[in-house]
Image (spheres, rainbow, N blue to C red):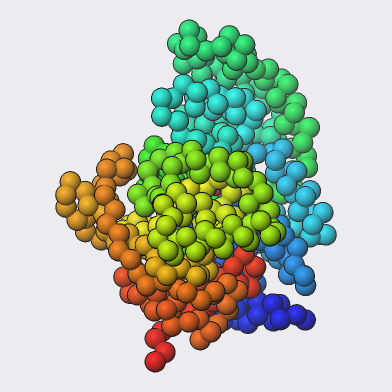
């Protein structure tokens, strides 16, 4: 057994001693996604039996590892994180289901982990078709302010669900003519809207949107449906039963608070209930109202796509393009190391502008979207936003991921408050999201962490400056940290509780 593996077992044990008695836990993201929820769930999963996804669809991307030594990497978009650890995985009704992508992902997972993971899919999950994707692209093209979606038609599937004319997983197991009829009705309900835009739309595209073939789509879906038949069930009923028999469940969120359809930066959001409260809705399990809640946030928040990001230090389109312009910086090697070393020196000498600092953090953190590979934009640690996310999610614990990215900095810029209409906002309060772009972030410099803390796994091994940073942040946020992430490896983490050691 190698050192890292022992380290991992020790971390899992410490987490168990902190929250081991909980039978239901919710893990949600506090910023704009990509906070590393997968890593937190990976550490927790060994103490639980079932993982259930309560929102999102193929727009999400979670990275987890098998329990082998050395571990194998599993990236999932639809299947909950527990497959890598051979836990039962459930796709709850709050998630959006893409049959073809699911089947491919399932096969890839089997190839990596070497066994068929147990996965259940709720019969009520709304189903994706290629027409949804086409229509979503059309909607984006028509918008003046584009959202910058991941192109997985999530908003459209949700809208169609809310119009009560979409198809769900259960429809794939009914007679063929019923499915054809449902698809025909679905396509027809959009005729008037599309007709109205006839002038603006390229005739070829309009024809594909107006006249998809419901028979062809039904055949495509029905050809693959038997592959998932044994996995489909009323997962709410099943989960209730499992909980009553003492099984322990983690509800995993996709996306995050800033992308929540109601509490995020509307309209620049995804379409699910991504906050912790979405767990009860998306699983149909009232017990989640009383579950322990863990909110995951990054030390340096990131965002892809459009929309307000108050502590941002970069231009969004430059951030998106940067990895395409300089792919060599995202490959491990001498060139990347030299770049990081020089940039850090320039930042500490105060020679680097904001964009240069952001580039450094994007390269250092390999901040590329898991689904679209777009470069993520970077912001400073943002306390007012974190306090908002805490108020909305009401967590029992916080996890601060990518804490190691602050290594080597002489000073760390922290947004401590926002001014809105020249007034300070009270903690936890934000202007309506449409006007969030009008806040003026008030930054202060905190003492940096000169040492390299990457890979550190014990609180007592952290230098005093890092401990001080964590305790100051913990006090301002008013919620205890469960875990600090100190690197990309699954054992690169420190588990709380964190207290001052004189
Ligand atoms: P959609 O979810 O594809 O509709 O995209 C809506 C917005 O949410 C866009 O700005 C996306 O970039 C963003 N988004 C969706 N899923 C994720 C994610 O998993 N991580 C980060 N951003 C996401």
The C terminus is located in which quarter?
bottom left
Instruction: Work out whether residue 34 or residue 397 is closer to the camera in this orientation and state it.
Output: 34
Front residue of 412/309: it is: 412
The answer to whether residue 159 is left or right of residue 370 is: left
Any part of residue 37 in sight: no
| Frontmost residue, 456 versus 496 | 456
Q: Residue at x 61, y 41 (%)?
A: 324
Above or below for 4 versus 236: below
Disc count in the image? 0
x%, y% of residue 393? 39, 59
Residue 153 visible in rendering: yes
Task: Please give the name of the residue rendered at 82% of the width and 54% of the height, measured from the top-left corner.
Answer: 111
Q: Residue at x 71, y 26 (%)?
A: 218
Q: Residue 398: percent from the left, percent from the top?
A: 44, 68
Task: Please determine whether, in this image, residue 146 is positioned above or below residue 469.
Answer: above
The residue positioned farthest toward the bottom in the image shown: 502
Horizontal relation, residue 261 to residue 459: left or right: left
Residue 48 position, x and y percent, is: 61, 70
Residue under the point 67% across and 20% down: 214
**Quadrant the N terminus occupies:** bottom right
In the rendered image, the vertical position of residue 219 relative to residue 490, given as above or below: above
Quadrant of the rendered structure where residue 414 is? bottom left
Tell me residue 71's x, y (percent): 75, 67
């Amino acid at each position: 057994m190698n050192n890292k593996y022992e380290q991992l077992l020790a971390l899992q044990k410490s987490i168990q001693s902190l929250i081991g008695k909980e039978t239901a836990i919710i893990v949600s993201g506090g910023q704009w996604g990509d906070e590393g929820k997968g890593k937190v769930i990976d550490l927790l999963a060994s103490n639980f039996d079932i993982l259930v996804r309560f929102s999102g669809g193929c727009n999400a991307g979670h990275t987890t590892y098998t329990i082998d030594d050395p571990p194998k990497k599993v990236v999932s978009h639809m299947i909950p994180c527990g497959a890598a650890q051979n836990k039962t995985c459930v796709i709850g009704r709050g998630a959006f289901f893409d049959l073809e992508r699911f089947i491919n992902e399932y096969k890839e997972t089997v190839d990596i982990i070497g066994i068929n993971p147990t996965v259940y899919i709720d019969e009520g999950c709304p189903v994706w078709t290629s027409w949804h994707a086409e229509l979503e692209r059309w909607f984006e093209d028509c918008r003046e302010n584009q959202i910058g979606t991941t192109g997985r038609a999530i908003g459209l599937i949700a809208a169609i669900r809310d119009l009560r004319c979409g198809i769900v997983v259960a429809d794939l197991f009914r007679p063929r003519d019923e499915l054809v009829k449902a698809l025909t009705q679905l396509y027809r309900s959009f005729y008037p809207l599309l007709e109205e835009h006839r002038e603006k739309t390229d005739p070829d595209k309009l024809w594909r949107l107006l006249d998809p073939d419901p028979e062809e789509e039904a055949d495509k879906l029905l050809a693959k449906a038997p592959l998932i038949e044994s996995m489909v069930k009323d997962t709410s009923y099943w989960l209730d039963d499992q909980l009553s028999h003492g099984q322990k469940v983690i509800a995993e969120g996709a996306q995050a608070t800033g992308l929540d359809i109601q509490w995020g930066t509307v309209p620049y959001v995804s379409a699910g209930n991504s906050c912790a409260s979405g767990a009860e809705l998306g699983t149909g399990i009232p017990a989640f109202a009383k579950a322990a809640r863990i909110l995951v946030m990054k030390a340096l928040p990131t965002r892809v796509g459009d929309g307000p990001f108050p502590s941002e230090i970069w231009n969004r389109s430059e951030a998106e393009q940067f990895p395409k312009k300089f792919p060599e910086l995202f490959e491990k090697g001498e060139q990347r190391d030299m770049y990081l070393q020089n940039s850090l020196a320039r930042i500490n000498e105060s020679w680097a502008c904001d964009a240069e600092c952001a580039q450094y953090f994007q390269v250092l953190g390999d901040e590329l979207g898991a689904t679209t590979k777009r470069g993520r934009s970077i912001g400073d640690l943002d306390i007012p936003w974190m306090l908002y996310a805490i108020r909305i999610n009401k967590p029992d614990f916080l996890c601060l991921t990518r804490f190691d990215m602050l290594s080597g900095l002489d000073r760390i810029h922290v947004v401590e408050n926002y001014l809105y209409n020249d007034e300070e906002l009270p903690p936890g309060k934000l202007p309506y999201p449409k006007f969030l772009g009008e806040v003026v972030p008030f930054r202060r410099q905190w003492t940096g962490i000169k040492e390299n803390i990457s890979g550190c796994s014990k609180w007592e091994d952290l230098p005093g400056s890092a401990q001080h940073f964590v305790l100051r942040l913990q006090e301002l946020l008013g919620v205890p940290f469960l875990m600090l992430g100190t690197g990309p490896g699954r054992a690169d983490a420190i588990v709380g509780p964190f207290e001052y050691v004189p």
